[in-house]
Amino acid sequence: MSIIQHRKRKQIVSHLVSLFAVLIFAYPVVWILLASVKPEVQIYRYPLQLLPATWDFSIFQKVFTAAPIATYLANSLLYSTGAVVISLGFALCAAYGLSRHQFRGKQLILILILVVQMIPALVTVIPLYLLMRSIGLYDSRLGMVLLYSALRIPWGIWILVGFLDQIPMALDEAAYIDGAGQWTILRKIIFPLAIPGLASAAIFTFVGTWNEFAIASIILRSTSNLSIPVGSLAMIAADPNDWRLIAATATINLLPVLFVFSMLQKNIIAGLTRGAVKE
Amino acid sequence: MKRQSSYHQLLAFMKGPGPFLIPAIIILIGMRAFPFFWQFWLSMTNMRLGTTGKFIGLQNYAFIFRNPSFFQSIGYTVVFLVSTVGAQMLLGLALALLLENDFKGKDIYRIFFLIPWVVSGLVVGILWQLMLVETPYGLLNALLIRFGGSSVAWLSNPMNARISVIVVYIWKGLGFSMILLSSGLKTVPLELIESADIDGASYMQKLLKIKIPMMKDIISVNVIFAVIASLNSYETVYVLTSGGPGGATNLIALLMFQTAFGDRNQLGRGAAIGVVMFLINLVFVLIYVRKVQFGKGARS
C-alpha cells in the first residue's frame, strides 16, 4: 500500500517537474510561432497570452512581398542539399578507404580527421574569407555550396567509418571473388548497407547547414545569395520594431527545422548519442 | 632496399585505399588544414582589407595582450564557459535522472526538452530578444509587471546582460547534455544498483557513489563538447547584445569578428585572436582524442 502510494507520488512529482521544464523550454518557441498570426494590438496589449484571439496570416504575405524571402529559402535549400550530397559523397569514399584497408599511417589519418572535425571552422573564418576572395568564390552561391561541403567532410568521414566498420568484410570478399572491383563493391554492396548511416549523417548535415549563420554572414553579400538566417537578420535589422515581422521571420526559419525534427526525432536522438560517444 | 619497399607500399596504396582517400584528403588539406597555417601567418602581419599587409612579427599578440578589451573579453568568456558548462551538466543530469523515472509520456517530454537545441542560434537570439527586451512589451517584463513588480533592464545593464546571455546559452545547450547523460545512465549496470538497494543505500548515495563514478567517461566527453560549443559561441550573443553594453558580453568569438570585419577590418589582428581561440580549442580536442584513443584502442 505505502509502496504503491510512494510510486504514485513519484509519478505525480515527475509529471509536475516535467511540465515545468516544458514550460521553460517550449513556451518561448511556441509563443513566437503564434505571435506571428496575432493581430498587432494583441501582442502589445496581452503579451503573455499564448493563443491568438483572431488568426491573422497577413504578415506572411507582407514578409514574402517585402523581402526576397523565397530566394533566401531557395538558397538555403541549395546550400544544405548541396552540402549533404557533396560532403557525404566524398566522405563515403574516404570512409570506405579507411574502413576496408590496412595501411601505414591510417591511425594518424583517423586521429587528424577527428582533431580537424572537432575544431569549429568558425575559428578560421578569417583565412576562409580570404581564401574565398582569392579563388573568386566570395559572395557566390557555388562558393557557399563548396565551402559548406568541404567543411562538413571530416565529420562525415568520422561518422561513416563507424558505420562501415560494422558491415562485415565477408560481403566484400564474396563480391571480390565474384570478380567485382572496388568501385563496384562500394556502389553495390557498401552503399546500400550504409544507407541508414548516410541518412543519419544527412539529417545532421542538413540541419547544421540550414542553421549556420556566422560563416555565411561573412561570405555572402548580395541579396540574391543570402541564406535564410543571414537574410532574416537583414530583414529584421531593416524593421526592428515590427514584432509581427520578427515573429514571422523566426517562424519561417523554425518551421522546416521543427518539421524535420518531429519527423525524425528518434534517429536524431540516436545519432546524437552515437556521434558523441562512438558506439 | 628501403626505397623499393616504400615504392611498393605506395603502389599498394594507389591500388587499394588511395583513390578513395586522396580526393577527400586534398580538400581537407586545402579547406581545413591550410587555413590554420595561413591564420598563423596572417596573425603576424598588419593586413587590413584591401592591403596585402607586411610582416610585423608578434606585434599583434603584444597588442592584444596589452589591450583591456581583450582581457575583458577573455574574462567574460571564462566566466561564461564555467557557468554555462557547469549548469548544463548539473541541470542536464537532473533532467536525465527525471527521465529515468517510469512515468507516462516521458518520451514526449524528452522531445520538448530538446526543442531549444534544434532551434538555430540566430532564432534563439531573436526569440530571447523578444523575451528580454526592456519596453513593457518584453514578455518577461510584462510578466513582472503583471505580478506587481517593475520592469528590469535585462540587456542594457552590464551585469544583467552578462547573466542573461549565460542563461540563454544554458537554455539552448541543456537538451544536448540531457541526451548524453541519459545514455550514460543507461550504461550503469542494474545489478550494482540492486545490490546497493539491498544494502539500504539512499538515492543520493547511489547517485554519488555508483552512478556518477560509472559515468565518468561520458561526463568528461560531455564537458569537452559543451566547452567547445560555448567557446565558439557567436550568433546568439551577437543578436542579443552584440557584445554590449560597453563590451560587457563581448565573447572572444565576437571580438574576433569585430576586429577582423568591423569598421577597421584589421584582419591580421583578428587572426591573432583566431590563433588564441584555436589553441584553446586544441587543448580540449586533444584531451578528447586521448580519451577516445585510450577508451577503446582507437579504430583499426
Image (cartoon, coloured by chain):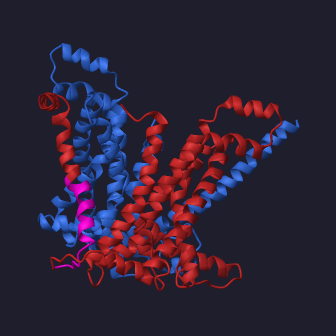
Chain colours: A blue, B red
The picture quadrant where one finds residue B252 is: bottom left
Left or right, A55 with reference to A108: right
Please identify the dominant SS of the magenta region: helix
Of the pair A27 and A56, the residue shown nearer to us: A27
Q: Position of residue A138 (x, y in %)?
A: 17, 67
Instruction: Tell me where the magenta segment starts and ends, as one range.
Output: B30-50
Identify whether B279 is placed above or below B265: above
- As drawn, is B296 to the left or to the right of B153? left
Taking the image as drawn, is residue B222 in sight? yes
What's the residue at 30%, 47% (across, down)? A154
Q: x%, y% of residue A18?
A: 65, 53
The front one of A103 and A213 is A103
Above/below status of B271 relative to B6: below
Q: Residue at x 63, y 50 (%)?
A: B93
Residue A242 visible to the viewer: no
Residue located farthest toward the front when viewing the structure as drawn: B1
Locate residue B111, reporting x and y percent: 53, 49
Residue B31 within the segment the image draws in magenta: yes
Q: Is residue A159 magenta?
A: no
What is the residue that sits farthest to the right in this orientation? A1
Q: Nearer the viewer, residue A185 or B51?
A: B51
What residue is at 21 percent from the left and 38 percent from the top? B21
**Where does the N terminus of chain A fall, quadrant-wise?**
top right
Residue A183, given in percent of the width and then of the height, sits at: 16, 28
